[in-house]
């Protein structure tokens, strides 16, 4: 990034380009509650940011404090370069990015009324009334109070009354939930990675025997649970491979390092040091940096990292034998 000019905040309408803002951008009087911020590129804001509307036209941009908008956080569709949010992002209304050529990263949670993202990495979770993601990686969960649309993306889990899915949906945790039956386009695949040896994949080492991804039968493998409170009942549908995970006690899943990898991804910029998973075949440290973790999961999403497949079937007698010997 080029040398940036330090700026002091006072204007009612801000246009930032080639600027370094060492303070927060917060309203100091009522007239500044309606302040719009437009970022034209090459800007770093070290403190918290508040805007009525925040528009990012071009990168590189780094928000190192929390961000909140009253109306909208909008990233221009033609935006390029790196755009990163190191802490939580919130909006009373919308968070929107359909940019195809920028490198967009959120290293904490997103909380808004409506979230629409394309080609984005989210280290935390997304909380909103309506969520729509396409070609995204969300290490945490997708928690929508009204509707969720997920297209060719990776997520930890999801919970929404209404869910639409298309292409491939990868889940990092054993279970996901909805109220209505999931609607999906023909050819849609749900793939669970909770038994995949992500640690070895990250290091480029051979995957553990018995590990792999499991293709879920989202249409038939659902469990209905009815919750009762007084006179009201509510049915929740669970899509899970938890039975297969329990049976996988036959496998030493601790050596997969999945939990360590996902924890490092979720904490990302909050960690005070860089951890690693040991060394690769060349003897180099495999560091769990946010950049490396993001690249790894997008390689899974695009098929550049091949994960072996297990069918998820198990022999009950083997489980009983295993338990009787413990």
Image: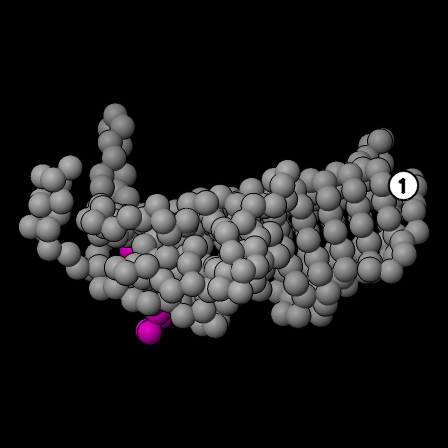
On screen, residue 197 above or below 242 = below
Please provide percent x and percent y for residue 228: 24, 31
Residue 183 magenta-highlighted: yes
Answer with left or right where residue 52 lies relative to residue 312. Answer: right
The furthest residue to the front: 283
Give the residue at mark 1: 9
- Toward which corner of the image does residue 208 lie, by quadrant? bottom left
- In magenta stretch: residue 166: no
Kindly report the secondary structure that dominates the magenta region of the rendered protein: loop
Which residue occupies the foreground of this view, 305 or 256?
256
Extent of the magenta region: 181-189
- The residue that appears at 80% across and 37% down in the rendered structure is 24
Q: Residue at x 11, y 40 (%)?
A: 325
Vertical relation: 233 (above or below) 222: above
**Quadrant of the rendering where the C terminus is positioned:** top left
On the image, the x and y values in percent for residue 210 come to 26, 59
At mark 1, the secondary structure is loop
Judge left or right: residue 325 versus residue 87: left
Residue 96, placed above or below residue 111: below
Tell which of 93 and 204 is nearer to you.
204
Q: Nearer the viewer, residue 272 or 282?
A: 282
Left or right side of 6 for 314: left
In this view, the residue in front, 161 or 308, is: 308
Q: Is residue 153 visible?
A: no
Instruction: From this view, report whether residue 295 is shown above or below residue 65.
Output: below
């Amino acid at each position: 990034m080029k040398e940036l000019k330090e700026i002091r905040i006072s204007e009612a309408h801000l246009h930032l380009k080639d600027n370094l803002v060492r303070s927060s951008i917060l309203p100091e009087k009522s007239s500044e509650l309606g302040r719009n911020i437009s970022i034209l590129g090459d800007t770093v804001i070290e403190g918290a940011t508040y805007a009525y509307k925040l528009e990012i036209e071009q990168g590189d941009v780094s928000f190192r404090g929390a961000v909140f908008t009253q109306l909208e956080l909008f990233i221009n569709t033609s935006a390029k370069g790196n755009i990163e949010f190191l802490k939580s992002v919130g909006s009373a209304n919308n968070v929107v990015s359909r940019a195809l050529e920028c490198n967009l990263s959120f290293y904490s949670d997103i909380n808004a009324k409506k979230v629409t993202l394309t080609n984005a990495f989210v280290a935390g979770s997304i909380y909103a009334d309506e969520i729509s993601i396409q070609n995204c990686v969300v290490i945490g969960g997708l928690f929508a109070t009204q509707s969720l649309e997920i297209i060719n993306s990776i997520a930890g889990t999801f919970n929404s009354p209404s869910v639409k899915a298309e292409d491939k949906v990868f889940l990092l945790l054993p279970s996901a939930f909805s109220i209505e039956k999931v609607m999906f386009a023909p050819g849609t695949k749900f793939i669970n990675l909770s038994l995949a040896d992500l640690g070895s994949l990250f290091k480029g080492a051979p995957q553990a025997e018995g590990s792999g991804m499991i293709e879920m039968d989202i249409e038939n493998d659902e469990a209905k649970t009815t919750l009762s409170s007084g006179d009201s009942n509510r049915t929740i549908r669970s899509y899970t491979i938890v039975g297969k995970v329990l049976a996988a006690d036959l496998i030493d899943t601790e050596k997969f390092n999945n939990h360590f990898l996902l924890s490092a991804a979720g904490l990302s910029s909050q960690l005070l040091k860089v951890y690693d998973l040991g060394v690769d075949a060349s003897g180099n440290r495999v560091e769990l940096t946010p950049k490396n973790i993001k690249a790894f999961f997008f390689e899974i999403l695009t098929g550049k990292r091949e994960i072996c497949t297990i069918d998820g079937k198990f022999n009950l007698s083997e489980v009983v034998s295993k338990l009787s010997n413990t």
